């Protein structure tokens, strides 16, 4: 083979890969719109990371613990708080029924997001950005700058706090999107605050409703009221070879709590429970709520931020809307001092949001790698004791 031929083949391949890699960055929907009979190499997971690898996985559908918000706000509060606590410890997930958010608001949010994904690519792509800190971002996979294998998912992420600052940056098309997100973000925020109050109570950090010291519980809640909120609309196109790839690879959510509206028609969310992957069976008109990394840290490990992933469907596309909530961006995330004792020593380092954002931007988003990086091992604990007492 002549050196010129080898060079030509090599150059062609490089060019092809360059074109291909650029295409992947335009998102899965764009790729599918031009017709795909097979999953491109960029999305094929190594054999051991593919879904359906183990016979046990996905064999059973899981009915998550159900928390009834109406009971939580009524005379059954104490009993319901116990169920909440058990769900956060054992599953890291629960389904919330009777949540009080009008179905119209949910429907409008879904519809506006769907219309956004249906816009021509040129319109959607205006919001693509490599910068993870912008208030609106359209993108694909998890961290498309770092992921070696891409996920079969496109997303629209909208920061919601403070609303007056971020709103002018949100897409102006489709016309109804801004209003739908404003309504939906306000309603999910107040729902989140009710849940946070219950979570603090369940951890013994504020008094139960009857003998609560108003000032004490207000102080605690003020920080949460000023907290960050990110609404993520996820779109998972149907996939010709769903056993080779995932809509989202195993991950934990970073924040305090995530309020997720799963697609009611198309299942796909799986959580890791008792060592295997189980599919969540959505209940109509309910939220799937999960504990995030920041709550695991705050509770000093009592509540678990559980790994979850998303399967894709061979026939149908799937959509979900996640609302991720945490403390304000300038807060320090740390185990609550009241939950640390000799018997239960501090398990995580203090983490500020900036180092968290830095970590996310520079690492492939995989498993619970962020949380693991904050965990205090016995050795690290001794070292921090040594330095603090020098
Ligand atoms: C997420 C997530 C699950 C889903 O957005 O972090 O896990 O069902 N979504 O789309
Ligand atoms: Ni998630």
Image: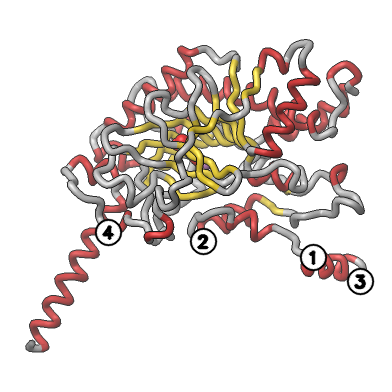
Q: Are marks 3 and 4 in contact (CB under 8 Å)?
A: no
The disc label shown at residue 122, or none: none
**Mark pair 1, 4: CA separation:** 42 Å
Image quadrant in which you'd find residue 326: top right
State whether label 1 is within 8 Å of ligand 2: no
The answer to whether 120 is drawn above or below residue 8 in the figure is: above
Q: Give the mark nearer the N terminus: 3 vs 4.
A: 4
Q: Earlier in the sequence, mark 4 or mark 2?
A: 4
Where is residue 225 drawn, in percent x and y?
69, 29
Mark 1 or 4, nearer chain start: 4
Q: CA distance from mark 3 to mark 1?
A: 19 Å
Residue located beneath label 2 in the image:
362
Residue located 54% across and 54% down the image: 367
Q: Secondary structure under badge 4? A: helix
Decide which of tag 3 and tag 2 comes sooner along the chain: 2
Which dot, 4 or 2, sits closer to the camera?
4
Query: Where residue 244 appears, x then y in whole percent?
Result: 32, 52
Q: Residues within 10 Å of mark 4 (few under 14, many from 20)?
A: few
Dot 2: within a 10 Å radius of its alpha carbon, few (fewer than 14), some, or many (20 or more) residues?
Answer: few
Q: Residue furthest front?
A: 55
Q: Which residue is mark 1?
A: 378
The secondary element bearing badge 3 is classed as loop
Q: Disc 1, disc 2: CB below 8 Å?
A: no
Residue at image mark 3: 390
């Amino acid at each position: 083979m002549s050196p010129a031929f080898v060079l030509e083949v090599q150059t062609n391949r490089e060019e092809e890969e360059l074109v291909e890699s650029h295409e992947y960055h335009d998102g899965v929907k764009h790729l599918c719109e031009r017709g795909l009979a097979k999953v491109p190499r960029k999305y094929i997971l190594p054999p051991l990371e593919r879904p359906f690898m183990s016979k046990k996985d996905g064999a059973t559908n899981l009915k998550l613990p159900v928390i009834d918000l109406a009971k939580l706000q009524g005379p059954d509060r104490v009993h319901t708080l116990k169920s909440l606590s058990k769900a956060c410890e054992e599953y890291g997930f629960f389904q919330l029924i009777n949540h009080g958010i009008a179905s119209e608001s949910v429907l409008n949010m879904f519809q506006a997001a769907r219309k956004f994904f249906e816009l021509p690519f040129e319109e959607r792509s205006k919001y693509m950005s490599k910068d993870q800190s912008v208030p609106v971002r359209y993108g694909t996979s998890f961290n498309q700058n770092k992921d070696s294998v891409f996920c079969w998912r496109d997303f629209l992420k909208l920061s919601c706090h403070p609303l007056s600052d971020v709103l002018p940056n949100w897409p102006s098309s489709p016309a109804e999107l801004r209003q739908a997100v404003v309504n939906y973000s306000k309603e999910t925020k107040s729902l989140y605050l009710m849940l946070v109050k219950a979570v603090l109570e369940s951890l013994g950090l504020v008094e139960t409703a009857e003998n609560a010291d108003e000032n004490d519980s207000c102080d605690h809640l003020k920080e949460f009221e000023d907290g960050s909120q990110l609404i993520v609309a996820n779109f998972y196109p149907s996939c010709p070879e769903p056993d080779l790839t995932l809509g989202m690879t195993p991950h934990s959510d970073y924040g305090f709590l995530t309020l997720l509206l799963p697609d009611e028609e198309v299942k796909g969310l799986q959580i890791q429970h008792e060592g295997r992957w189980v599919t969540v069976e959505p209940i109509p008109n309910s939220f799937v709520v999960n504990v995030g990394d920041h709550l695991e840290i705050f509770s000093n490990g009592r509540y678990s931020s559980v790994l979850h992933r998303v399967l894709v469907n061979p026939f149908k596309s799937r959509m979900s809307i996640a609302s991720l909530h945490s403390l304000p961006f300038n807060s320090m995330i740390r185990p609550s001092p009241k939950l640390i004792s000799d018997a239960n020593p501090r398990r995580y380092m203090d983490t500020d949001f900036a180092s968290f954002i830095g970590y996310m931007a520079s690492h492939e988003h995989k498993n619970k790698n962020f949380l693991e990086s904050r965990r205090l091992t016995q050795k690290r604990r001794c070292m921090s004791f040594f330095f603090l007492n020098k």
